[in-house]
């Protein structure tokens, strides 16, 4: 249920086909919207129900695999529950079947970077280390490669952790600040979803928390051993590397070669002395504030906005007033909120209808030494397939300048 466009649904469908199951894929998006994912399943014996859900499909199944993006309150999941049909996610199944200990990473910001660094550190000593989870790879696809000596690094979103009844051997929480409040009633409910990463740990397991963040308060609820890192993503990953006795020499070597992940404060081009930075994965106001602070010594032209996740933009507006020269807002409800907060300001604000228009506008405004920063602080689905598509369209528009 929920094929999606990021690859997890495709991986789950392939896995169950290989097990000899009769697979039906259903999604409210149309075949045209899901073309990239549907094409990846060509040649497999799969029945598709797209553009709608059918009630009978949720009664005549032995098992329903819910894509983490599917809302828990879906009436079709209720139909399944009322008919005693088990509902699981691919993460549930993976935890049931994985023979190796799991290192799980979650957090509002930084989880992809931390997961990737831990993977690169561990690979220096354990060559069959595997990275999967919330990165467009269903962990079910990598199950055949796993034995008890494998090290599994799993990036886990709050959506993937919802309802999980197992916790990884090592759990890392990078940061916690309000996000997805269009899905959760409040910040506390969002944190509760994240807690599954350590809730079922035992005393021999390890919980890694950020001593500079909201996460440190969770230590009192842990049954496992708690270790603290201070502040940065690198510190979190190094702490886990040290737990596995990775040498200082190997840690230094990995860090000297690591240039960061795409879509995260990534320099994509310098044109006429203007730097263009892609930070499309900044989907909360706090993430944008961190990016603005990082580049505050330069004159910033910020491209932001999109769909609101019921977040508060007051703090971001203050940061924009302090450190942004021009603000270009993409269409959406979050943009309306940001604009409303920006009263009595010297910042020039421009409204645009597309990414192409936004980038063209920046090229007219920017002077040598400026930076153009795409850091939206909002969801993307009114104009783009997802946040990564938003980044791709930004890169394409910059290349066309």
Image (spheres, helix red, strand yellow):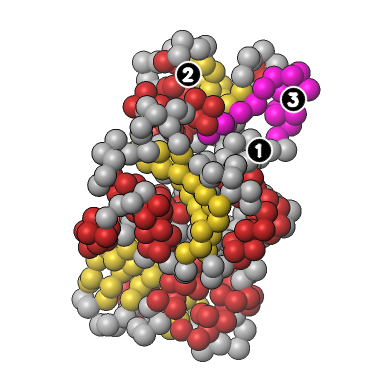
**Residue 389 percent across, percent down from the top left:** 40, 49
Residue wearing tag 1: 163
Residue 374 image point, x, y percent: 41, 66
Boundaries of the magenta span: 74-93
Q: What element carries label 1?
A: loop
State if disc 2 and disc 1 touch (CB < 8 Å): no
Q: In this view, does 371 lie to the left or right of 332?
A: left
Query: How far apart are labels 3 and 2 at the CA level?
Result: 21 Å
Q: Residue 16 carries which label?
A: 2
The one of 34 and 102 positioned closer to us in this rendering: 102
Q: Which residue is at a point 56% across and 87% down the rendered structure image?
A: 345
The image quadrant of residue 340 is: bottom right
| Quadrant in which the N terminus is drawn | top right
- What SS does tag 2 mark? helix
| Residue 366 visible in rendering | yes
Residue tagged by mark 3?
Answer: 81
- In the image, residue 31 above or below residue 221: above
Crowdedness near tag 3: few (<14), some (14–19) or many (≥20) residues, C-alpha within 10 Å? some
In this picture, residue 202 sits left or right of residue 351:
right
For the residue pair 336 and 109, the one nearer the viewer reads as 109
Taking the spot 54% from the left edge, 67% from the top edge, the residue there is: 211
The numbered mark, 3 or 2, whose residue comes first in the sequence reads 2
Which image quarter: residue 77?
Answer: top right
Q: How crowded is mark 2: few (under 14 residues within 10 Å), some or many (20 or more)?
A: some
Q: How far apart are marks 3 and 1 (CA)?
A: 14 Å
Q: Is residue 370 magenta?
A: no
């Amino acid at each position: 249920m929920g094929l999606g466009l990021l690859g997890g649904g495709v991986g789950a469908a392939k896995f169950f086909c290989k097990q000899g199951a009769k697979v039906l894929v259903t999604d409210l998006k149309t075949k045209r919207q899901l073309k990239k994912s549907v094409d990846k399943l060509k040649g497999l014996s799969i029945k598709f129900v797209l553009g709608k859900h059918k009630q009978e499909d949720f009664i005549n199944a032995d098992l329903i695999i819910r894509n983490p993006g599917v809302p828990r309150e879906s009436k079709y999941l209720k139909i399944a529950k009322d008919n005693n049909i088990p509902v699981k996610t691919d993460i549930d199944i993976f935890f049931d079947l994985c023979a190796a200990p799991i290192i799980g990473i979650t957090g509002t910001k930084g989880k992809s970077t931390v997961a990737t660094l831990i993977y690169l550190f561990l690979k220096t000593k354990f060559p069959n280390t595997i990275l999967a989870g919330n990165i467009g790879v269903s962990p079910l696809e990598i199950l055949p490669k796993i034995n008890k000596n494998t090290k599994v690094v799993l990036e886990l979103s709050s959506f993937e952790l919802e309802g999980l009844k197992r916790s990884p051997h090592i759990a890392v929480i990078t940061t916690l600040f309000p996000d997805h409040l269009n899905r959760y009633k409040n910040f506390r409910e969002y944190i509760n979803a994240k807690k599954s990463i350590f809730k079922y740990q035992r005393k021999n397991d390890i919980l890694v928390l950020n001593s500079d963040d909201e996460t440190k308060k969770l230590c009192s609820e842990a049954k496992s051993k708690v270790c603290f890192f201070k502040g940065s993503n690198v510190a979190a990953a190094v702490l886990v590397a040290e737990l596995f006795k990775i040498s200082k020499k190997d840690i230094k070597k990995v860090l000297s070669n690591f240039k960061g992940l795409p879509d995260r404060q990534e320099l994509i081009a310098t044109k006429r002395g203007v730097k263009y930075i892609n930070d499309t994965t900044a989907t909360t106001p706090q993430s944008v504030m961190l990016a603005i602070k990082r580049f505050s010594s330069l004159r910033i032209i910020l491209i932001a906005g999109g769909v609101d996740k019921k977040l508060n933009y007051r703090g971001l507006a203050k940061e924009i007033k302090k450190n942004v020269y021009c603000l270009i807002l993409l269409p959406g409800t979050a943009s309306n909120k940001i604009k409303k907060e920006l009263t009595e300001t010297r910042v020039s604000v421009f409204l645009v209808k597309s990414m192409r228009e936004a980038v063209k506008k920046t090229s007219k405004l920017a002077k040598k030494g400026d930076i153009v920063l795409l850091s939206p602080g909002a969801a993307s689905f009114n104009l783009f397939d997802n946040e990564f598509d938003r980044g791709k369209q930004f890169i394409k528009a910059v290349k066309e300048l």
